[in-house]
Image (tube, helix red, strand yellow):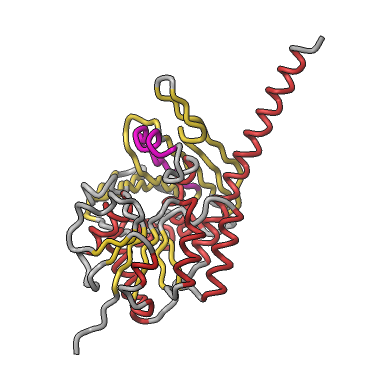
């Protein structure tokens, strides 16, 4: 008897759905993929996938009980998409990051999850990375002493995508939604639960064009374990970098994640007072994540949703902190202008 297989449904054929998820599905055993995207031009060049223009059309081609849905839609549309999928009987969901753009959206998604008993997992592929496993081992084994702090640098130039999508609901609302969700899950996994200490974002400037909140971002976390984490992401950087620096009592370990799907090699650099050691290895974390998720779905074992919820809450809290700071600066500027023009 042939082993059971699950059939993928890709909702959203942007860079994530068509450029990443569909390519990964070619490497693992699944049923023939179906995709859904309302845009007339979406999926025209794709081969080996049935493209539909609505979830109603896609649902007619699928059996919800044997389908895994990859939710790759823009962040702002996520609650509505998940609601329609749940109403049509689909319960196995792999949701692209970020899970939600604000607390209201997060609360709605959590409500849907409970109401429809959704087996939902956020696509946090770095948690499936071999590099994360190596870093996790260094923390748990304490070969270099206890972990004291983590510094994360996630930089890349993102001018074109920001300028093209910022005025529509297809883009990310802020720099916090672009790279930071990747690292939040990893630092919570390595150092445990955390509370937000500081957060900020900057505008992006390109010639005479200014995009608010999209230049870069930074946040500081205090973990219950005593570890302190600093995460910085610059979307106007001339270089690309995805690095975690873990500072132990007797050593420093720096993990460099692969920069894109074009080269899946990671690097781990450990430095003590006596020596420096470099390891380079292949680390296709997205394929590992999706393969592991499909195996889990087949066994019926449920995903632990708590880390996804806590990471999303921290992200929403950081946005609220940034907005309050932004509002305070605007109010102060308005007050100064009023004073200057007073008779």
Q: In this view, does 129 lie above or below 292?
A: above
Left or right, residue 324 beside residue 272: right
The answer to whether residue 307 is magenta is no
Quadrant position of residue 144:
bottom left
Front residue (pair 46, 254): 46
In-image side of 141 versus 13 (left or right): right
Answer yes or no: is residue 303 visible: yes
Q: In this view, does 262 lie to the left or right of 209?
A: left
Quarter holding the N terminus?
bottom left
Image position of 329 with respect to 131: above or below? above
| Coordinates of residue 223 in the picture (x, y in percent) | 57, 53
Residue at (34, 45) in percent of width and height: 271
- The residue at the far top in this view is 343
Give the residue displayed 40% in from the left and 24% down from the top. Answer: 206
Whether 44 is drawn above or below 162: the answer is below
Q: Front-most of 192 and 106?
A: 106
Please state which of residues 232 and 10 is positioned toward the viewer in this rendering.
10
């Amino acid at each position: 008897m042939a082993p059971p297989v699950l059939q993928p449904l890709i909702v959203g054929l942007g860079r994530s759905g068509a450029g990443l998820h569909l390519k990964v599905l070619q490497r693992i055993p699944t049923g023939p993929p179906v995709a859904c995207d309302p845009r007339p031009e979406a999926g025209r060049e794709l081969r080996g996938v049935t493209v539909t223009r609505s979830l109603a059309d896609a649902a007619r081609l699928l059996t919800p009980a044997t389908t895994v849905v990859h939710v790759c839609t823009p962040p702002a549309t996520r609650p509505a998409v998940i609601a329609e999928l749940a109403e049509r009987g689909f319960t196995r969901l792999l949701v692209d990051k970020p899970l939600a753009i604000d607390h209201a959206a997060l609360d709605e998604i959590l409500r849907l999850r409970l109401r429809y008993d959704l087996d939902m997992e956020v696509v946090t592929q770095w948690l499936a990375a071999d590099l994360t496993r190596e870093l996790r081992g260094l923390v748990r084994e304490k070969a270099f002493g206890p972990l004291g702090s983590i510094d994360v640098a996630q930089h890349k130039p993102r001018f074109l995508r920001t300028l093209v999508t910022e005025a529509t609901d297809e883009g990310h609302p802020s720099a916090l939604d672009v790279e930071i969700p990747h690292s939040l899950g990893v630092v919570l996994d390595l150092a445990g639960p955390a509370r937000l200490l500081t957060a900020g974002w900057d505008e992006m400037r390109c010639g005479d064009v200014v995009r608010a909140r999209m230049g870069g971002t930074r946040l500081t976390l205090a973990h219950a374990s005593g570890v302190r984490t600093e995460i910085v992401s610059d979307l106007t950087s001339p270089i690309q970098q995805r690095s975690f620096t873990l500072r132990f009592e007797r050593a420093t370990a720096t993990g460099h994640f692969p920069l894109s799907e074009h080269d899946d090699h990671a690097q781990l650099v450990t430095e003590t007072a006596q020596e420096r050691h470099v390891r380079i290895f292949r680390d296709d974390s997205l394929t590992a994540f999706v393969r592991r998720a499909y195996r889990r779905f087949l066994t019926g074992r449920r995903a632990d949703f708590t880390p996804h919820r806590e990471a999303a809450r921290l992200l929403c809290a950081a946005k609220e902190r940034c907005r309050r700071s932004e509002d305070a600066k605007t109010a102060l500027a308005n007050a100064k202008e009023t004073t200057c023009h007073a008779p």
